[in-house]
Image (cartoon, rainbow, N blue to C red):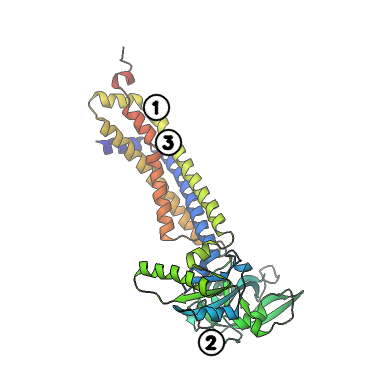
């Protein structure tokens, strides 16, 4: 009976309820876009670190887990490798350069260089991402590079192609030619796609304030990725990671070792960025609860005589509550469906450079939250409907 009453009223007042569903659709679009933007910006900051084939990241002790402020000398890397339980250690250096794009725009002007993160690694050590096309880095001094999928797409590069890196050396702009030997999955760092090169090659390419060459023995890196010998059980593995971090700090002076999650969560701006976007998402959900709650409360006030008649002819509070709840849920579901279809359709047409990513977990969490705002917002109207007295509603009370 409750379902019949709900469908009957929805059909008779379909125009009014469709408008409410469109309001829910707008809220759905807002929440999904914010969720997708948060995921995209977050991955753009931490994707490379999150994908590291390692369990620990080692920083300079007083760098406060800031990659740019950390310097690890080669001697420290060798000391880390000698610690029992360490399988391999790979130094990693980060900087920013640009790829010179050939050709011109439709307006006839030269194409704007593509800004990328230059990541220097030791070939065959932790920090070098696996490739899905081509091969890994082989030569420590070779003019070769692994590019991530975003660089390949935006620059139109494939395995075997040569490209030009633009870098500031002191006050001069220098150009370096590299050859693509492999293409990896997306490896963004600092909201930019990545080019991965051997450490010694990258030391010549990366921007420098002082153009005087440093001796190879003085090479240092920002951080060191450490791969450990771990047991198969996940709980035991986590204990080993924690214990090995403490062991490294005890046996090697001047370092701080943290797990991968701690490393990427301390990437500059990541936590503040995610906190801001999550706050916006929560406010959108609160606004949705208030809007839907206000609408259904007005509906309940307008239906007081009808509810009184239903109760007078024997309808139970359960029937009245079920009819209201079904109405609210259906209106919310229609709005969420419309909003989801619109957002996902628009996402397919967005330019590559817009950092919006929809993962199954993010979308599912957002949709469940949106579906819940209808029933939560309608609780007040349902409670009001249950308290309606038949005689009072019909004006027959003395």
Residue 209 placement: quadrant? bottom right
Residue 138 badge: 2
Q: Spatial distance from mark 2 to mark 3, Cα to Cα?
A: 63 Å
Of the two numbered discs 1 and 3 on the same chain, state the one appearing first in sequence: 3
- Secondary-structure class at tag 1: helix
Instruction: State yes or no: discs 1 and 3 in contact (Cβ < 8 Å).
Output: no
Label 3 crowd (10 A; few <14 / some 14-19 / many >=20) = many
Give the foreground label among 2 and 1: 2
Q: Is residue 235 left or right of residue 99?
A: left
Residue most toward the front?
250
Label 2 crowd (10 A; few <14 / some 14-19 / many >=20) = some
Q: Spatial distance from mark 1 to mark 3, Cα to Cα?
A: 12 Å
Identify which residue, 71 or 287, lies in the foreground. 71
Identify which residue, 89 or 264, lies in the foreground. 89
Q: Spatial distance from mark 2 to mark 1, Cα to Cα?
A: 75 Å
Q: Which quadrant holds the N terminus?
A: top left
Of the two numbered discs 2 and 3 on the same chain, state the one appearing first in sequence: 2
65 lies above or below 205: above
Q: Which quadrant holds the C terminus?
A: top left
Of the two numbered discs 2 and 1 on the same chain, state the one appearing first in sequence: 2
Residue 188 placement: quadrant? bottom right
- Find residue 227 and report its horizontal and vertical position in percent: 46, 76
According to the picture, the residue beneath numbered tag 3 turns out to be 293
Residue 150 badge: none
Residue most toward the top?
398
- Secondary-structure class at tag 3: helix
Residue occupying image coordinates x 54% and y 80%: 79
Label 1 crowd (10 A; few <14 / some 14-19 / many >=20) = some
The mark total stands at 3
Q: In this view, does 330 lie to the left or right of 223?
A: left
Residue 301 badge: 1
């Amino acid at each position: 009976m409750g379902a019949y009453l709900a469908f009957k009223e929805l059909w008779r007042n379909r125009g009014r309820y469709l408008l409410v569903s469109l309001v829910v659709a707008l809220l759905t679009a807002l929440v999904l876009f914010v969720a997708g933007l948060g995921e995209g910006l977050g991955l753009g900051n931490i994707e490379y670190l999150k994908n590291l084939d390692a369990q620990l990241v080692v920083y300079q002790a007083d760098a406060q887990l800031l990659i740019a402020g950390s310097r690890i000398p080669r001697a420290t890397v060798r000391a880390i490798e000698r610690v029992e339980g360490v399988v391999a250690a790979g130094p990693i250096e980060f900087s920013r350069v640009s790829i010179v794009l050939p050709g011109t725009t439709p307006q006839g002007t030269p194409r704007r260089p593509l800004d990328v993160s230059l990541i220097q690694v030791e070939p065959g050590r932790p920090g070098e991402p696996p490739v899905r096309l081509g091969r890994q880095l082989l030569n420590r001094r070779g003019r070769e590079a692994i590019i991530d999928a975003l660089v390949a797409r935006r620059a139109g590069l494939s395995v075997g192609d040569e490209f030009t890196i633009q870098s500031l050396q002191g006050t001069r702009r220098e150009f370096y030619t590299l050859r693509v030997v492999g293409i990896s999955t997306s490896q963004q760092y600092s909201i930019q796609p990545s080019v991965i090169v051997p450490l010694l090659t990258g030391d010549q390419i990366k921007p420098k304030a002082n153009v005087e060459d440093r001796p190879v023995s003085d090479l240092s890196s920002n951080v060191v990725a450490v791969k450990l010998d771990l047991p198969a059980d996940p709980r035991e593995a986590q204990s080993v990671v924690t214990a090995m971090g403490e062991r490294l700090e005890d046996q090697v002076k001047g370092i701080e070792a943290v797990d991968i999650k701690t490393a990427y969560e301390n990437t500059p701006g990541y936590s503040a960025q995610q906190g801001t976007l999550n706050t916006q998402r929560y406010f959108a959900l609160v606004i949705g609860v208030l809007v839907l709650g206000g609408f259904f409360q007005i509906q309940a006030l307008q239906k007081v005589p009808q509810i009184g008649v239903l109760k007078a002819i024997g309808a139970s509070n359960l029937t009245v509550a079920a009819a209201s709840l079904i109405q609210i849920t259906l209106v919310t579901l229609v709005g969420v469906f419309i909003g989801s279809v619109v957002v996902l359709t628009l996402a397919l047409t967005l330019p590559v450079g817009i950092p919006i990513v929809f993962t199954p977990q993010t979308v599912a969490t957002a949709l469940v939250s949106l579906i819940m705002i209808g029933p939560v917002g309608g609780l007040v109207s349902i409670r009001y409907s249950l308290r309606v007295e038949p005689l009072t509603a019909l004006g027959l009370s003395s």
